[in-house]
Image: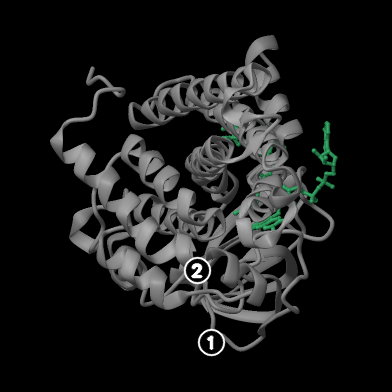
Amino acid sequence: MADIFALDEDERAISETAADFAAEFLAPNAVEWDRTKHFPVDVLRKAAALGMGGIYIAEDVGGSGLRRVDAVRIFEKLAAGDPSIAAYLSIHNMVAWMIDTYGSDDQRRQWLPALCSMETLGSYCLTEPGAGSDAAALSTKAVRDGDTYVLNGVKQFISGAGESAVYVVMARTGGPGPSGISAFVVEKDTPGLSFGANEAKMGWNAQPTRQVILEDVTVPAENLLGGEGNGFRIAMNGLNGGRINIAACSLGGATAAFDAAVSYLADRRAFGSRLLDAQALQFRLADMRTDLEAARVLLLRAASALDADAPDKVQLCAMAKKFTTDVGFTVANDALQLLGGYGYLSEYGLEKIVRDLRVHQILEGTNEVMRIVIARSVVGA
Ligand code: FAD
Ligand code: 2MC
């Protein structure tokens, strides 16, 4: 097995490309995009031109054909520039992967080239007002009518909604529970599809979050992905990769906050010396650095398990998501503390990172749900 900790020349080039992109196009604008709630689609398309619109999508439809270990390294680097934009890109990649993996050749050719170039953007629609953690209780309905399906329901908290052209929507075609759920591709211009207001949020302000409202939305039967009754499994398999990508976004954001704190402490003088010389603060930095490295190791372990389709991939992705997003938030919040009052000012960028990383403990499965997944693997349920 390849050593996931030793990067070869190609892997280093991929990682450096993402880091350079983040430094040039994301970091200088992140605070302003957060303040103005600007979703920079033009910059996303620039990332796509470098292959980041379809990182682990097959090359025949415009993807980059890379592995999950490459993807988490890319998302970590991008998030060091802006966690919110990196996280949207991760959701877009998850949507593209679901179509690539479960779609027919016709479906792949219909939607993936434009998704990979990010000429069109993708959104993932699982959560509903009445069904979040208990996703298999969703109530959006899809009823077969001749050569079409008619969808009715409301999806809640949908990232990219209103801007995306392609919505992968999980809806009920059968009885209660996971086996009654199917996945559909719904295009933005379909009559009956509308969007709620852009939610006012604590963080993730550089990407929109809206309800997706489906009122007698009629799609061709060919928009069904992977056959009736397979939607929940498709949604969950998408989320395994989504969870480690979000974790990578926490790692990148927290690493940027940590680096900023170290630089600040090296410059800041108090009580006759540099704050960086205070051993109490050095010990704090040592703990933060250790936690980040531990998170990185677990994340690469989970990504590698996903690449290998290992039997324990689901729980490893859940562990990496829980551990890394908790560590990421704590490290970013500690970094803010190390800047004293300046950490609290917007212009230093740290409070934005803390706000962005907070939601990673909630979405793509809350960290309580991650414990459910891990615990089931322990008790054998
Ligand atoms: P609930 O399920 O109501 O949970 C409330 C609390 O109870 C949580 O702390 C939860 O962990 C806890 N809890 C629930 N059940 C249990 C249990 N059995 N044991 C212990 N604790 C439990 N969804 C999408 O489908 N697509 C998106 O693009 C998307 N983007 C999002 C963007 C943002 C900014 C946000 C905030 C959310 C987004 N979501 C998206 C939704 C997100 O996945 C859900 O918010 C999340 O899964 C939790 O669901 P909920 O909010 O309904 O909370
Ligand atoms: N990977 C692959 N398959 C999975 C899976 C996973 N991660 N999780 C469940 N499955 C399969 C499972 O193996 C089972 O298959 P089978 O019928 O062949 O045995 C089937 O799916 C049903 O699973 P469960 O019996 O475990 O279903 P249950 O209703 O108990 O729920 C739970 C499981 C709680 C883990 C699931 O509902 C869940 O993950 N909830 C959280 C929802 C979530 O993550 N939402 C995120 C929305 S997206 C978002 O936030 C964004 C920002 C994009």
> As rendered, which of 23 and 9 lies closer to the eye?
23
What count of labels does the image hold? 2
Where 324 sits versus 63, above or below?
A: above
| Residue positioned 51% across, 40% down in the render | 263
Residue assigned mark 2:
29
Q: Is residue 72 visible?
A: yes
Which of the 4 quarters of the picture holds residue 129? bottom right
Residue 92 appears left or right of 239: left
Residue 113 appears left or right of 311: left
Point out the tag, 1 or 2, that comes first from the N-terminus: 2
Local SS, label 2? helix
Local SS, label 1? loop
| Residue positioned 60% across, 79% down in the render | 162
Q: Residues within 10 Å of mark 1 (few under 14, many from 20)?
A: few
Identify the mark at residue 203; answer none if there is no mark.
none
Q: Position of residue 133 (x, y in %)?
A: 76, 43
Q: Position of residue 207 (x, y in %)?
A: 59, 68
| Residue positioned 59% across, 21% down in the render | 282
Amino acid type, label 2 = Asn
Where 265 sits versus 113, above or below?
A: above
Q: Position of residue 352 (x, y in %)?
A: 66, 56
